[in-house]
Amino acid sequence: MLAQTDGPEHLLQAKEQDNVFWIKPEDLLTTCILQKRRGRKYDQVLQGARDVFLRDGYDGANVDEIARVAAVSKATLYNYFPDKRLLFLEVARQEFSQQPEAAGCIVQPDLAPRAMLELAAGRIVATCTAPLSVAIFRLCISEAERFPDLARDFYEQGPLMAQNMLSGYLEQAVARRELVIDDIPLAANQFLELCKAGIFARQMLCPGTEIDPDLADKVAHEAVETFLARYGKEDREQAAVPASRTAAE
């Protein structure tokens, strides 16, 4: 049930059973349409739309092609989604819903720093070089101005969540005196960016580019070595020994 109230500006109050929440008027149509999503061909429509949007982008995708790829009639497609915008939003939301699980996979809190960072680097590089991940990222960036809220959701559920989870691990490692870090969020961001060095920009700007597995492994390895050279306690202590000897001499 929806009703205009004196609540937050420009929002409608919605009630489902005993839960009350607020919804943007422009999202009202989306909410109503998604109530139909139990239809047996719903998944076919979304899969076909996903394939076409990732291949052709939002502007390049057309309803006829989506219906053809999904193997449904246009009438069936329109029954679920009366316009392309709603269909794109639902496809994007479904893709984004998988990001928290992927972000969680990069951190294993029971591992020592080197082992954990090696595992994380391998998984981050694999994500950055996976064709599907690159296609979704590229599509999200290209449509950020048209769908700013969606772009923000993508950032918060993907890159930002990965940063926060890595920060949580680094904070614990610092508390155990395994790492020496003053600015933990910055360090987490630095590690994530090191794992993209020489790979991510090429993937984003040069469609069809394939990253050599040896290069991917090297980027992951060097990301760990560079990070530990800066923040690893043992590495910093070893680097300090020659300096102290030189000073003494």
Image (cartoon, grey):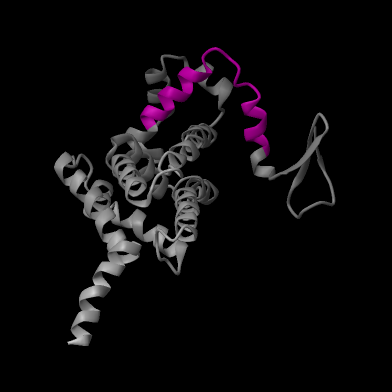
Q: Residue furthest top?
A: 40
Task: Report the side of 52 relative to 222 (left or right).
Answer: right
Q: Position of residue 169 (x, y in %)?
A: 47, 51
Q: Position of residue 114 (x, y in %)?
A: 32, 50
**Magenta segment boundaries in residue numbering:** 28-52
Q: Residue at x 36, y 54 (%)?
A: 192
Residue 50, quarter of the rendered image: top left
Report if residue 127 lies within the magenta region: no
Q: Position of residue 136 (x, y in %)?
A: 38, 39
Q: Quadrant of the N terminus?
A: top right
In this view of the protein, which residue sits in the foreground, 120 or 88? 120
In this view of the protein, which residue sits in the foreground, 58 or 23? 23
Is 10 rendered above or below residue 230?
above
Task: Report the side of 35 relative to 96 (left or right).
Answer: right
Q: Position of residue 23 (x, y in %)?
A: 71, 43
Q: Residue at x 46, y 63 (%)?
A: 184
Is 64 rendered above or below residue 169?
above
Question: What is the tally of numbered marks visible in this picture?
Answer: 0
Task: Report the side of 130 relative to 161 (left or right).
Answer: left
In this view of the protein, which residue sits in the foreground, 54 or 152? 152
| Magenta-colored segment: predominant secondary structure | helix
Q: Quadrant of the C terminus?
A: bottom left
Q: Residue at x 83, y 32 (%)?
A: 18
Report if residue 40 lies within the magenta region: yes
Is 38 rendered above or below residue 174?
above
